[in-house]
Image (cartoon, rainbow, N blue to C red):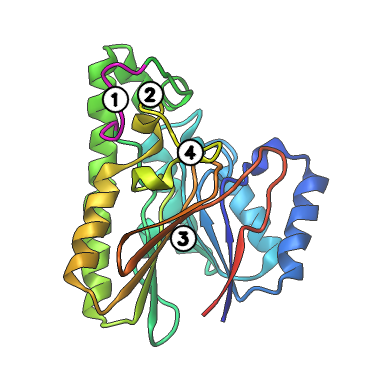
Amino acid sequence: MKLTWLTDIHLNFLEKNKREEFYQKIISVEPDAVLITGDIAEAPSIEDMMKEMVSYLHKPIYFVLGNHDYYFGEVAEVREAMITLTQTNNKLYWLPASGVQQLTNEIILLGQDGWADGRLGDYENSRVSLNDSRLINDLFQKKLLGRMQLLKKMQELADVDAAKLHDDLIKAVQLNPKKIIVLTHVPPFREACMHLGKISDEDYLPFFGSKATGDVLTEIAEKNPHIEFLVFCGHTHSESQCQPVSNLIVEAGNAEYYHPAVQKIIKI
Ligand SMILES: [Fe+2]
């Protein structure tokens, strides 16, 4: 089985002919299924982009959403739309709705979007302000109340997804696989948050990483040393690979606005 991994493709920035060129690139790889680790489009366009993509590829697309996919929208509304999309299109799998997927006898796929939780780096003294807190309504409303209220909301979103990830991982482990592949948008460890060849600085880390996700992955990987865990993520647009536990590998993808790419071909 051949999988292609895409991340941070930001299709809404492209004209239709450029999107078609990109779909042709994916088709030329001849994948059996496509994995996407978020930042596919924005809230007003994500549904149409997923429908468009599958109409060209005709292959199962397993995906999670990134922060950009919620821009100009509300988290709950976007998620409702993704649940409906997953229920009504037999090739589109928003993994938080579809749940654990058995790809082969030995390999399971699952995923949760994940959110930066301000717990890596130095949130308190950081002056960084991302578009998330202007363009995602849930975060914007909290930012109006102050930076600590914003932090609380970021952590609430991150912790809900981390808890769902924990539940999915427990279900997956019970199926006794050799390998579990996890898709998530926000890197779960500081070593996976690279920028210009170095780990992102203390000001940016609070917005680039999700410690909540990392803690769950570490716990489950350490408890199940006989299973190999492979995590794909995006968000930083900077390639990285780290191995925080001997049976846990985390890969973050490279990305450039206006130049979506096939990140990797994975043969399983
Ligand atoms: Fe992102």
Q: Which residue is mark 3?
A: 86
Amino acid of disc 2: Asp
Q: Secondary structure at mark 2?
A: loop
> Is the Cβ of the residue at disc 3 closer than 8 Å to that at disc 2?
no
- In the image, which is nearer the foreground, mark 3 or mark 2? 2
- Relative depth, front residue between 64 and 212: 212
- In the image, which is nearer the foreground, mark 1 or mark 4? 4
Q: Secondary structure at mark 3?
A: helix
- Rounded to the nearest whole Å, what is the CA distance between mark 3 and mark 2? 37 Å
Q: Residues within 10 Å of mark 3 (few under 14, many from 20)?
A: some
Residue stretch in magenta: 118-126
Q: Which residue is mark 1?
A: 122
Q: Which residue is mark 2?
A: 203
Is residue 8 rendered to the left or right of residue 257? left
Q: Is mark 1 within 8 Å of ligand 1?
A: no
Amino acid of disc 4: Lys
- Outermost residue on the right side: it is 17
Residue 150 in picture, x, y percent from top left: 29, 22
> Is the Cβ of the residue at disc 1 closer than 8 Å to that at disc 2?
yes
